[in-house]
């Protein structure tokens, strides 16, 4: 996505808000600009240092994966409103924040990127009526046990909900069943070792909860649009 003057102006406008992070990303999840608070959060010096980077360059994999999954929903036309989530910092700590994201369109109405803001969650604020906070224990459970069997009943129990309420609420908030979300999470987490390690496809498959390399390949291709081997070659070439 080519950055236009209005987006640069917005970044400068948000520079005045020291507790609010603002950013613009293209369809591939690469940062186009960010405001000063976002620059400082990630330990950078100037916004230009972030250009071309993705969340996987700036955040731990489990946090970056959630950001990317939400971005993909926004690229389909959804908006993210008052998402309560952990946002990592340059010092390897993480802070609970309230995040909002919208799609960005070109002059023809085509979605070409995303924009978002996040701010620290104030103590006691946003907990009432904040649906994502109620599902946070389930998301945490999935990230901690993604390679194993993750029953819906365990996820519902972690959120102190009945199974019926949990399933309805999860699908409403994420547009996916917990099983489909977990499948996408496994694929996204597997992307990093494909690019940054020499681990075999079979070992990556096993480590990320797939029954074998063939199963991994099918799910990866369905989610990413290419085989794991092709993905590895493509991004290592870059």
Image (tube, grey):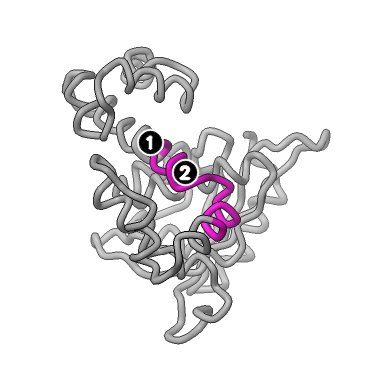
* Callout in the foreground (2, 1): 1
Residue 176 lies left or right of residue 87; in this view the side is right
The image quadrant that residue 148 belongs to is: top left
Q: Is residue 179 magenta?
A: yes
Q: Mark 2, residues whose alpha carbon is within 10 Å: few (<14), some, or many (≥20)?
A: some
Q: Is residue 197 left or right of residue 99?
A: left
- Residue 219 occupies quadrant: top left
Q: Residue furthest right?
A: 108
In depth, the one of 24 and 197 nearer the eye is: 197
- Measuring 34% from the left and 42% from the top, which residue is drawn there? 57
Which label number is shown at residue 188?
1
C-alpha span from label 2 to label 1:
9 Å
Q: Is residue 34 left or right of residue 58?
A: right
Q: Nearer the viewer, residue 113 or 31?
A: 113
Residue 75, given in percent of the width and then of the height, sits at 63, 40
Q: Is residue 78 magenta?
A: no
What residue lies at 46% left-to-right and 76% top-to-bottom? 121
What secondary structure is marked by label 1? helix
- Do callouts 2 and 1 mark residues in contact (Cβ within 8 Å)? yes
- Prevailing SS of the magenta stretch: helix
Q: Residue at x 59, y 44 (%)?
A: 73
Rendered-image quadrant of the C terminus: top left
| Residue 102 drawn at (x, y percent) | 65, 52
Near mark 1 (Cα within 10 A), the count class, few <14, some 14-19 or many ≥20, is many
Question: Which residue position is annotated with label 2?
Answer: 68
Which segment did they paint magenta?
Answer: 168-184
């Amino acid at each position: 996505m080519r950055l236009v003057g209005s987006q640069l102006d917005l970044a400068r406008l948000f520079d005045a808000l020291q507790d609010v992070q603002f950013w613009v990303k293209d369809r591939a999840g690469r940062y186009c600009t960010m405001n000063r608070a976002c620059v400082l959060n990630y330990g950078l010096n100037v916004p230009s240092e972030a250009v071309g980077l993705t969340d996987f360059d700036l955040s731990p994999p489990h946090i970056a994966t959630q950001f990317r999954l939400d971005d993909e929903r926004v690229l389909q036309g959804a908006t993210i409103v008052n998402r309560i989530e952990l946002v990592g910092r340059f010092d390897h700590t993480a802070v609970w924040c309230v995040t909002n994201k919208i799609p960005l369109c070109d002059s023809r109405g085509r979605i070409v990127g995303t924009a978002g803001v996040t701010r620290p969650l104030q103590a006691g604020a946003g907990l009432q009526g904040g649906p994502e906070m109620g599902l946070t224990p389930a998301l945490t459970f999935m990230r901690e046990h993604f390679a194993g069997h993750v029953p819906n009943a365990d996820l519902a129990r972690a959120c102190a909900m009945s199974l019926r309420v949990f399933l309805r609420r999860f699908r409403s908030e994420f547009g996916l069943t917990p099983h489909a979300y977990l499948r996408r999470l496994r694929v996204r987490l597997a992307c990093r070792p494909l690019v940054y390690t020499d681990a075999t496809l079979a070992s990556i498959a096993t480590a990320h909860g797939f029954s074998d390399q063939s199963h991994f390949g099918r799910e990866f291709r369905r989610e990413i649009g290419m085989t794991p081997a092709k993905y590895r070659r493509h991004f290592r070439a870059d």
